[in-house]
Image (cartoon, grey):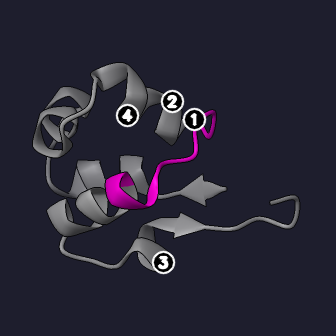
């Protein structure tokens, strides 16, 4: 699964730590999400989408292998 978290963070001038605090996870979790090493729970995906005022589908996209 690919995502646009890093791009969305840049648009808001937000650090990984800032985003982590907003959604209640560690900075390492955000880092793992951005690198595609971790697939978020539905709740976490919804929280991230809410921070960026967009939809989950706009941030997370399935790839052929998923």
Residue positioned 37% across, 34% down in the render: 30
In the drawing, what numbered circle is on residue 30?
A: 4
Residue positioned 41% across, 72% down in the render: 56
Give the labeled residue for mark 3.
Answer: 57
Residue positioned 53% across, 57% down in the render: 3
Mark 2 to mark 1 CA distance (whole Å): 5 Å
* Circle nearer the N terminus (1, 3): 1
Give yes or no for contact between labels 4 and 2 (Cβ–Cβ under 8 Å). Answer: yes
Q: Is residue 28 left or right of residue 19?
A: right
Mark 4 to mark 1 CA distance (whole Å): 9 Å
Residue 47 located within the stretch drawn in magenta: no
Helix, strand or loop for disc 3: helix
Quarter of the picture holding the C terminus:
bottom right
Q: Residues within 10 Å of mark 1 (few under 14, many from 20)?
A: some
Residue 38 located within the stretch drawn in magenta: yes
* Circle nearer the N terminus (4, 1): 4
Name the spot of residue 18 as percent of width and height, x first: 13, 34
Q: Examine the image and state in which quarter residue 22 appears.
A: top left
Helix, strand or loop for disc 2: helix
Give yes or no for contact between labels 2 and 1 (Cβ–Cβ under 8 Å). Answer: yes
Determine whether 45 is above or below 28 in the image. below
Stretch of the chain drawn in magenta = 36-44
In the drawing, what numbered circle is on residue 32?
A: 2
Q: Nearer the viewer, mark 1 or mark 3?
A: 3
Prevailing SS of the magenta stretch:
loop
Give the labeled residue for mark 1.
Answer: 35
Helix, strand or loop for disc 4: helix
């Amino acid at each position: 699964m690919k995502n646009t978290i890093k791009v969305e963070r840049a648009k808001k001038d937000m650090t990984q730590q800032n985003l982590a605090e907003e959604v209640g996870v560690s900075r390492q979790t955000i880092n793992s999400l951005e690198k595609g090493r971790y697939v978020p729970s539905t709740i976490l995906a919804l929280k991230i989408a809410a921070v960026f005022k967009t939809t989950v589908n706009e941030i997370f996209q399935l790839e052929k292998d998923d």
